[in-house]
Amino acid sequence: MFQILTHDILPVFAILALGYGLGWRGTFSRAEAAVVNRVSLTLLQPALIFPLVATVPIAEFDVRALALYGLCEAVGFGIAFLIARRMFRREAAEALMLAMAVVFVNSLLYIWPISFLIYGEAAALPVTALVAWDASLVFGIFIIGAELIANPSAGLSSAGRRIATNPILLAIAAGAVLNISGLPLPAPLITAAEFAGAAAAPLTLFALGVILSQQSLRPSPVVAAISGLKLLAFPALVAAALGIGGVEGRWNDLFTLTAAGPSGAMAFALALLHGVRTDAVAPVIIWTSVLSLISLAWLA
């Protein structure tokens, strides 16, 4: 467990910590990090997601495990959203981001590279399946939801145009079409996507660290509640559902490992992009990132 923690998990987490430290010292400003976050969100992450969706071996997926995990995400999101809205009286857009932080794990930028370091590409197929699931369908739903809720005055037509031209959604759609059609990806396109996509995780985590360094990390009641739901309730829900559903072996282990991961940085990135309040979702990401280190090492 200690070797996994020091050799595979901490090096990835260190990028986030480095950004936080340099932001705290004033070496990088929030404005600079916001630009980096925007470049990563609109350019690098589509390059990372496109080949993933286009080449992922859908036929090898455990559909039952994915369906159970998706059901847990829906249940967990509904509970977290109601708690944020009813108990803590948060605006709908912020409640959406807080609920997203509970069920949308940092799988693409955090768990995926860690699982490849630990298990290798073949053994990490379950994590790849979840990354494809979250990065395409689930993230797409959150992008659309954020557009509709965060900018209600813009109208449906304006929101529809932004959704239709969103780079990540376009990358997901293009990748899905190529995957279903069975058409091969041109080698130069793969090279370009891999070259750009490789920078997505470290740049996003670094920018996130810089921006979070400007936020208060005080564990307020809403931060404690959402972090608890993420670190305890959601992994327990997934483990219980997989056990009841008869999912065993590597799919059970790695789905539970992924569910125990920290809150996805995309909740914060979307909040920042749409001007949604971040004083609660930012500490949730930091606290879950720190507190999940030991549990991830133990489960791995």
Image (cartoon, rainbow, N blue to C red):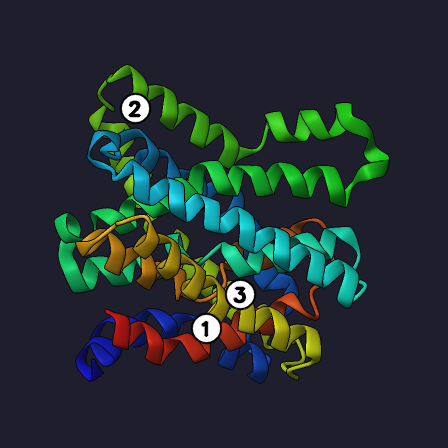
Of the 4 image quadrants, the one containing the N terminus is bottom left
Farthest residue in the front direction? 244
Where does the image place residue 144, in percent across and percent down from the top left? Answer: 63, 36
- Taking the image as drawn, is residue 275 in sight? no
- Which residue in the structure is indicated by mark 3? 208
Judged from the image, the secondary structure of the residue bearing numbered disc 2 is helix
**Closer to the N terminus: mark 1 or mark 3?**
3
- Which residue in the structure is indicated by mark 2? 179
- Which residue in the structure is indicated by mark 1? 289
Residue shown at 24% from the left, 60% from the top? 253
Where does the image place residue 170, in percent across and percent down from the top left? Answer: 49, 28
- The image quadrant that residue 222 belongs to is bottom right
Above/below status of 219 relative to 160: below
- Taking the image as drawn, is residue 297 in sight? yes
Decide if residue 159 is on the left or right side of residue 15. Answer: right
Above/below status of 42 relative to 155: below
Viewer-proximal residue among 227 and 11: 227
